Image: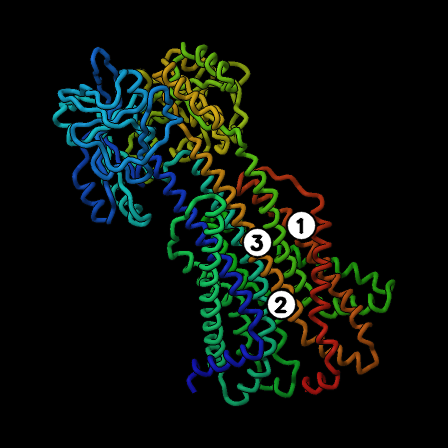
Amino acid sequence: MNLLRLSLRMLLRDWRAGELRILVLALIIAVSGVTTVGFFADRVQRALVNESSQLLGGDLLVSSSQVLPPGYEQQAKRFRLKTAALTRFPSMVSYADNNLLCAIKAVTPGYPLRGKLQLTSLAEGDELSQSPARVAQGIPAPGTVWIDEKAMAALDVKLGDKLEIGMIELTVTELVASEPDHSVGFINMNPRLLINEKDLAASELIQPGSRVSYQLLVAGEIADVAAYRSWLEAQLVPGQSVEGIQDARPEIRAALDRAGKFLGLAALASVVVAAVAVALATRRFIQRHLDGCAVMRCLGATQSVLLRLYLYHFLMLGAFSSLLGCMLGVIAQEFLSRWLAELAGTVLPPPGGLPAVQGMLTGMVLLLGFSLPPLLNLRQVPALRVIRRDMGMTSLHGFAGYAFGLLMLSTLFIWKAGDLKLGLLIMLGFLLAVAAFAAIGWVIIRLMLLMRAQGSGAWHYGLANVKRRTLASLVQAVALGLGMMALMTLTLIRTDLLQDWQTRLPPDTPNRFLINIQPDQQPALFTFFEQHEIAQPEMFPMVRGRLTRINDGTVRPEDYDHNPHAKQFIMREFNLSWMDKLQQDNEIVAGEWWRSTEADFNELSMEEDFAKTIGVKLGDRMTFHIAGEDFTATITSLRKIDWDTFHVNFFAVLRPGSLDNYPATYVTSFYLPPSQVGVMQHLVRAFPNILIIDVASMIERVQTMIAQVARAVEFVFMFTLLAGFIVLYAAIAATQDERRYEAAIFRTLGARKRQLARAWLVEFAILGGLAGIFAAAGSGVLGYVISERTLHLSYTPNPWLWLIGILIGVISVTAAGLIGTRSTLSQPPLLTLRKAG
């Protein structure tokens, strides 16, 4: 008979007999949890990418000081991407006797590709921020211009008036309320005008030597955008740059990274618990098929035939369970996404197909990882076992049989972590936890055996059961401990760590940034804040300079072709600042803050991740070109910045007095309550040179994301909890056959059901207590590592963790054990002994 057909028949037989329930349930839960988290995380990531892309007006922004090659746009269309061209430049605009320097943006149809260009109608006495806005349908028609309120107020124009722009006159037809990309570029501190690209040539504004930025917006599917960016970065020449979501503000990148880590940890927790159930269920499955293998060996089956037969068996089982788990994951993530959409008022974009592939691979890795070693043992079952039942069992006990499964699970950790170092640390920690749990459990069991004579008969017999099955008891206790550890760690993530993350972004987080504040404007600005009852913000000086040398080497953009992110920084001007005291959201991680006595050189403190990006370290000298002069400073410290605060921070900070000889402007951030948004229009009129950047929507998006992640973790917690019940069931079922036979022997010798139940109660309580100790210790260590090393959050030990862990372990394992063994005690001893043969 064909082996595949025979394997299918055996699979159906085992299914009808109930042999595969635990395995199938464990796999379905593991795959469902992974795919649910994967699909949801993918959708959140896509939504955040779309949201962040609105800050650019597209998914990618290509910029150059020279006209971009036509091939850039042509290649984008070959990648099935939408495009829009922009030309930005400053120019004087006139109306009547009024002249004003404005930031002009000439656009082509399709602008913006992401986000919305909002227009408003400003009636007499209205303020822009309080007027209803509407989404623009298209761009300015040729011969027309759209202006913002700054330009309207400064030029004293109204709709229908004609502005003189270069050699042409354009009619003001709309008032711009907001642009998605208004903070992009070097001239956006000025009042803004939007014109049609077709009017640009006639205006004759672009002349040789003009300060112009030529830009290309690109948008499309994530994979197509990534492929186009890879092609484009190989074509860029000095003076050209590309910017995307990867280059977003550090606050957004930090939030994105942490959200992904929270969801990934939640998924890994469910995988660990399910893996324990798979390991226990596989062990029981192999034990129950030893006799069948022995019979087939007697009938002439070779080891190769047995191995292939059961390998087909598990491959079909894994494919079916994983596919079903993926289907449930799709349904669950859709339910979760719709539920969160109703709560948050946002609709998530559809997911990609990669999470389904990851789910299928997770199911197969778990099943084969823990089933392949026992299958190799199964093929070696001797034919003599038909008459000698004690043969063919020795290699199924102990931890060695699970080594391959642990290796595969560790590989899964590395893959899911997306970081080799982090994955290896998780793998090492997991293996050390297994070894430590086993060693501690063995010691505790030995110590308890010394007290065996001091208890009742039930206590004596319960300890005797643990001693007789020391290795099997340790396997069960360690497996239950790992499952409970994952559950308790996820509970910790779900409560303490998420709450800590939420408190790091309080309601009064700064939501406005002011840039280009002149030194002599500070007193008047402080008075303005006081008059409008806004908390006085701290002002930070800022000097712009271009990095030209590191130590004795000249800095060239082409030297960073291998690191496009670093190349972007090298091609731009740096924002340099100085301060006397370290900010609260900064922490020195290497070197030291300013020395007590002023050094004979300029001291520089760098942000640690930024220093790694551009390849500098402590002691390196950095030379900046500032206002026509070279300025050199030595790195004396590296800082870690908490970007979650949305406070003003700088990659490069110097000792006060270092930059006194250079012109500086000031920047600040502050919280503006929603009820006072109209104040900003008064500020615009009082300080027309100051650029206001509104990040309120960005902060709101991050806060919404935190809430969504919190609810998603709670949703995934249900999968992990279900997997925990499966672990309990699998642990009890693993010894059910042996307990049934023992109960039959003892009852034949006169033992009562109550005596056996009490003895088992003691045994289950010991196993539960051991599992609780393991779980409390492991989750405490894991909680510290995850919070401090992975999520960069503060960790506060919970002294109740030990008591809670032990109580949960004892109660849950004891209750599950007694419920699971009721049928064992109710079966007549004679029937059990006959079946045992």
- Mark 1–mark 3 CB contact (< 8 Å): no
The relative height of residue 471 versus residue 41 in the rendered view (above or below) is below
Kindly tell me whether residue 315 is visible in this rendering: yes
Camera-side residue: 598 or 681? 681
Which residue of the protein is positioned furthest toward the front in this rendering? 124
Residue bearing the label numbered 3: 717
Find disc 2 in the rendering and name its residue. Answer: 730
Where residue 483 appears, as percent x and y from the top left, is 61, 58
Residue 494 or 801: which is nearer the viewer? 494
How many angstroms separate mark 1 from mark 3 (CA)?
Answer: 20 Å
Position in image of residue 76 (x %, y %): 22, 45
For the point 80% across and 63% down, which residue is it? 449
How far across and down, in percent of the image, does residue 279 sit? 57, 66
Element class at badge 3: helix
Pick the quarter of the image with the N terminus.
bottom left
Please name which of the two marks, 1 or 2, marks the residue nearer to the observer: 2
N-terminal of the two: label 1 or label 2?
2
Q: Which mark is residue 522?
A: none
User: Could you tell me the amino acid type at mark 3?
Assistant: Phe
Residue type at mark 2 is: Ala
Q: Which residue is mark 1?
A: 777
Residue positioned 49% across, 51% down in the render: 339
Mark 1 or 3 closer to N-term? 3
Disc with the residue nearer the chain's start (2 vs 3)? 3
Mark 2, secondary structure of its residue: helix
The image quarter in which residue 14 lies: bottom right
Q: Residue at x 74, y 76 (%)?
A: 825
